[in-house]
Image (cartoon, rainbow, N blue to C red):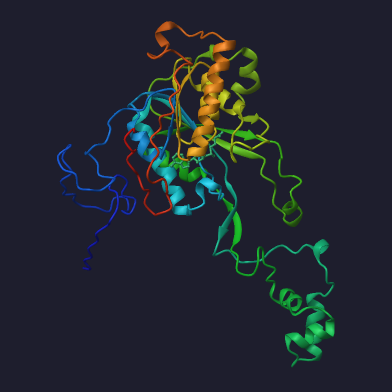
Amino acid sequence: MEISHKIINGDSRRMNELDDRSVHLIITSPPYWQLKDYGADRQIGFNDSMETLAINTVYCGDSVSLMERIAPDSIALSFWSPPYFLGKDYEEDATYDSWQNLLKNIVALHYHILKPGAFLVINIADIISFQDENMPRIMGMNPANRKCNVTKDMILKVQSEFPDYSRQQIASVLNCSEQTVDRRMNGNNIRGGKYAAGTHIKLVGGNIEKYACDAGLFLYDKRIWKKDPAWANCKWTTNTLKSVSETEDLYIFWKPGEYTVNRERLTANEWKEWGHRQIWEIPSVRINKEHPAMFPKELAYRVIRLYTDEGDTVLDPFLGSGTTAVAAIATNRNFIGIEMMKKYAEIATKNVKNAQQSQRLFSKPTMPKERLNKNEGVSVQTVFEIPQQKTVTYAAAAISATIPQPKE
Ligand SMILES: C[S@@+](CC[C@H](N)C(=O)[O-])C[C@H]1O[C@@H](n2cnc3c(N)ncnc32)[C@H](O)[C@@H]1O
């Protein structure tokens, strides 16, 4: 029998380096509470705050560590759209594995904080151009784009007449480039240059379902957000047989427990128009000045109104520009928002403050007193103290979960 030993220098809170069900026995002694400073930033149990996250607050930091501080059984709905692995500024270091680990960890953190009967709603799309090293590098021929009329048959004819001719000589007989000869003969009409990997569609729903199922949540429903065909005029659509991306998915997971089917949450017309409908037609956000991947407010309004009551708390661990929080405020719900990048957390805070102000000006909270939160109800407390995380990267195989810096 082969024996091997391994020491991992990393953070034990996730242990992504270990395969599931691979360990027979664990023997350990953790750091004792506040007893010793081992001199490591991420040490647990020494000088770390055990404060739970406050409602109606935008936090700037890594959700993987901050979500551990959300009060158990306190969230009525968690609605979010994670990075899509598209290389945006907030995910440029991500590998496919680290991105999957992020989703897996965030989904797993939900069981503890969702109320029994509560919902987790994830908005995500399949990856339409997933780069794959193993994919044969052949691109569809587009006769309209072909500048040279030389065909494979013409080259074969020259070859049969002059079997000893080199590629250069064949090119000169046919008055074309050597590259054309090579392309016609070897089919290496390569997308993005000779060495770039090919791309194909990668489905993401199955993995998310698995992560949720492993965490004790059940896939309760699935809806489709039908956007406008925003990319219809994009140049690449003329060079492929693929469709443009016009839909995204909403996966609705349920934490076992009693839940309410409250017909009064929507008007009769709303139930008919979208409450019962699987496909929601909502135009996507056209102006992405504040953030490169905002979802429309209407999407958040619908999800929040369908799955929660006034006074409930809605979480968004990928807050971005704050759309979920803004929709929560406008519908008299509390929110907790977490965003890793300071510039987006600041934009979210600004949007939250504006939403609170409009809510104060234009509407009165209608919820029963006992459902108002202890602070000041629906719209008053915005805190942006936000301990910035020291490490926010998830590029390594294991996620760097970090402890927030103490307040100044
Ligand atoms: C798709 S965007 C969300 C956009 C948001 N729904 C809106 O309407 O503005 C995903 C966001 O998650 C943030 N993010 C990525 N990893 C994170 C992490 N580990 N913790 C907290 N936020 C993270 C990114 O910076 C980005 O702003």
- Whole-percent x, y for residue 63 in the image: 41, 38
Q: Give the answer, above or below, for where 290 lies relative to 77.
A: below
Q: Give the answer, above or below, for where 114 lies relative to 369.
A: below
Camera-side residue of 155 and 337: 337
Q: Residue furthest bottom?
A: 164
Residue 260 seen anywhere in this rendered image of the structure: yes
- Whole-percent x, y for residue 271 in the image: 61, 18
Q: Quadrant of the C terminus?
A: top left
Side of 400 where 157 appears, left or right: right
Side of 155 where 48 appears, left or right: left
Q: Quadrant of the N terminus?
A: bottom left
| The quadrant where residue 52 appears | top left
Camera-side residue of 235 and 205: 235
State the residue at coordinates (64%, 70%): 194
Q: Residue furthest top?
A: 369
- Whole-percent x, y for residue 297 in the image: 60, 27
Residue 213 seen anywhere in this rendered image of the structure: no
Camera-side residue of 5 and 39: 39
In the rendered picture of this protein, how many numbered marks are placed on residues? Answer: 0
State the residue at coordinates (73%, 85%): 167
State the residue at coordinates (59%, 28%): 299
Side of 248 where 213 appears, left or right: left
- Whole-percent x, y for residue 12 in the image: 27, 48
| The quadrant where residue 256 appears | top left
Q: Give the answer, above or below, for where 172 lies relative to 67.
A: below
